[in-house]
């Protein structure tokens, strides 16, 4: 088999690459589509796809071209790209090499303006807290605009009419074209070199399209306006036009004439205000003088001024009153101290040890007397109880019964016999009388029940 008729992969890819390079229709291609698979790579080449409803193509945009893109590409954004088509040999795939990119839809400048406005707003450049107040009486006004336009003419006429005292200095700059932004920045930096000379700055131009007004939307111009030390009035375009310079400036004016009116006071109105303040000041001074004169007249006509000795009389009387008051206070205080002393002395006497000992002795004697009296009373009570008990015993004593002729019987065991059932025939018993006892032998026993005899 002959191998010379077979191409290598590299040879085939090289041949196809040459075909692409030699095709004049692929050298400059204008393409539109939707960004796909876009992942931003910082400081590097960008790789993504461009697609429509039916197809997709791989795109490469080298860093040198991507750095010139003035907006931020995002996934799904419709764009216009310009470039050429070629083959990437190592992989054998063709792709689009983009050299420029612009957003589609609303237009490149508008999309770029929206993105820059969002970025600067996020940094706070448009915040109200950074707005500086305008001076009321400016001495020097700096104007950044075209030297040949109607803007400077309108500003000069308005300033001379309203406040001729103010000096207007023009710092000419290009207000349209590719080099306008650098020209505007150079003029503002020149103004900044004068430091505190200028009280206010006006930047502006006449109306125009978005492209014509674009230098006033450049990021570098907007940041330079923000960095100016004096207040800035922006008058760019017509009233319906809004640039980023208008947003970052301290005050926005619809026209150059309005900008000059914001920057200067109206001299006739100021003169009227000055006259009114002068009249008010004179009236206030006259009123103060009148009040002070009346006070002086009252002093001159007072009794004290006619008879100065009365002033001392009153003071002497005051001294007497104070002396009496002091004496009375001292007497009261001394009496109060004396009373406190007496109370303290009595308190000390009350807690004296001798008095406590005497009190304890008196209590001891009192308790002793009570003890003796209680003991005697107790003994007497017990004696009375004993007498009563003895009387009761005497009343219940069998001896009393014996005195009346009765006797009592005891058996051989010296037990009292109260029933015939306790003895038997031939038992020996003792019969006790009141004056002695006898002994007897039982010869017979007879029982009785309810007075009747029993056998």
Image (tube, rainbow, N blue to C red):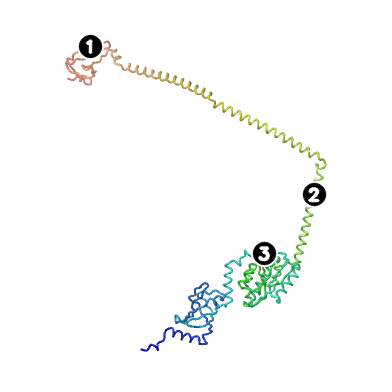
Q: Front-most of 144 and 196? A: 196
Residue at 22% x, 19% y: name it: 419
Q: Secondary structure at mark 3?
A: loop
Residue 133: give its label.
3
Q: Front-most of 176 and 240? A: 176
The mark that comes first in sequence, 2 or 1, is 2
Across and down, in percent, residue 297 comes to 81, 47
Q: Tag count in the figure? A: 3
Q: Secondary structure at mark 2?
A: helix
Across and down, in percent, residue 237 comes to 66, 74
Identify residue for label 1. 438
Q: Front-most of 424 and 144? A: 144
Residue 294: give its label.
2
| Image quadrant where residue 227 sits | bottom right
382 lies left or right of 428: right
Q: Is residue 290 above or below residue 117?
A: above
Residue at 22% x, 14% y: name it: 430
Q: Is residue 311 above or below residue 150?
A: above
Give the CA separation, mark 2 to mark 3: 45 Å
Label 2 crowd bin: few (<14), some (14–19), many (20+), radius 10 Å: few
Task: Report the mark closest to the observer, 1 or 3.
Answer: 3
Q: Front-most of 171 and 311? A: 171
Give the CA separation, mark 1 to mark 3: 154 Å
Across and down, in percent, residue 135 comes to 70, 64
């Amino acid at each position: 088999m002959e191998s010379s008729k077979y191409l290598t992969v590299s040879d085939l890819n090289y041949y196809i690459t040459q075909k692409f390079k030699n095709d004049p229709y692929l050298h400059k291609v204008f393409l539109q589509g939707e960004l796909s698979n876009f992942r931003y790579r910082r400081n590097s080449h960008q790789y993504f796809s461009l697609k429509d409803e039916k197809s997709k193509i791989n795109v490469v945009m080298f860093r040198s071209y991507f750095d010139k893109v003035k907006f931020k590409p995002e996934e799904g954004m419709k764009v216009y790209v310009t470039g050429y088509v070629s083959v990437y040999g190592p992989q054998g795939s063709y792709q689009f090499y983009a050299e420029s990119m612009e957003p589609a839809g609303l237009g490149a400048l508008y999309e770029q303006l929206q993105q820059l406005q969002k970025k600067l707003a996020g940094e706070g450049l448009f915040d109200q807290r950074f707005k500086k107040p305008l001076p009321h009486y400016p001495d020097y006004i700096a104007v950044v605009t075209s030297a040949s336009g109607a803007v400077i003419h309108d500003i000069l006429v308005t300033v001379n009419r309203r406040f001729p005292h103010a000096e207007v200095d023009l710092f000419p700059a290009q207000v349209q074209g590719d080099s306008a932004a650098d020209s505007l920045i150079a003029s503002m930096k020149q103004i900044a070199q004068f430091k505190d000379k200028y009280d206010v700055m006006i930047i502006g131009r006449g109306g125009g399209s978005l492209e014509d007004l674009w230098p006033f939307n450049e990021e570098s111009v907007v940041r330079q306006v923000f960095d100016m030390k004096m207040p800035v009035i922006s008058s760019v375009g017509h009233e319906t036009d809004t640039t980023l310079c208008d947003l970052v400036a301290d005050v926005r004016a619809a026209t150059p004439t309005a900008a000059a009116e914001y920057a200067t006071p109206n001299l006739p109105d100021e003169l009227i205000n000055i006259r009114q303040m002068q009249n008010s000041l004179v009236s206030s001074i006259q009123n103060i003088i009148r009040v002070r004169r009346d006070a002086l007249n009252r002093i001159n006509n007072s009794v004290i001024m006619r008879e100065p000795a009365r002033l001392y009389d009153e003071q002497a009387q005051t001294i007497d009153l104070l002396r009496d008051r002091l004496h009375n206070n001292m007497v009261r205080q001394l009496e109060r101290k004396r009373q406190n002393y007496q109370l303290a002395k009595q308190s000390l006497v009350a807690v004296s040890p001798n008095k406590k000992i005497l009190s304890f002795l008196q209590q001891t004697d009192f308790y002793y007397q009570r003890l003796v009296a209680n003991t005697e009373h107790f003994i007497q009570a017990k004696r009375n109880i004993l007498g009563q008990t003895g009387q009761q015993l005497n009343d219940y004593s069998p001896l009393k019964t014996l005195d009346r002729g009765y006797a009592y019987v005891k058996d051989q065991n010296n037990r009292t016999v109260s029933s015939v059932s306790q003895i038997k025939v031939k038992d020996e018993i003792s019969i006790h009388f009141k004056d002695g006892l006898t002994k007897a032998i039982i010869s017979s026993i007879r029982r009785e029940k309810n007075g009747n005899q029993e056998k």
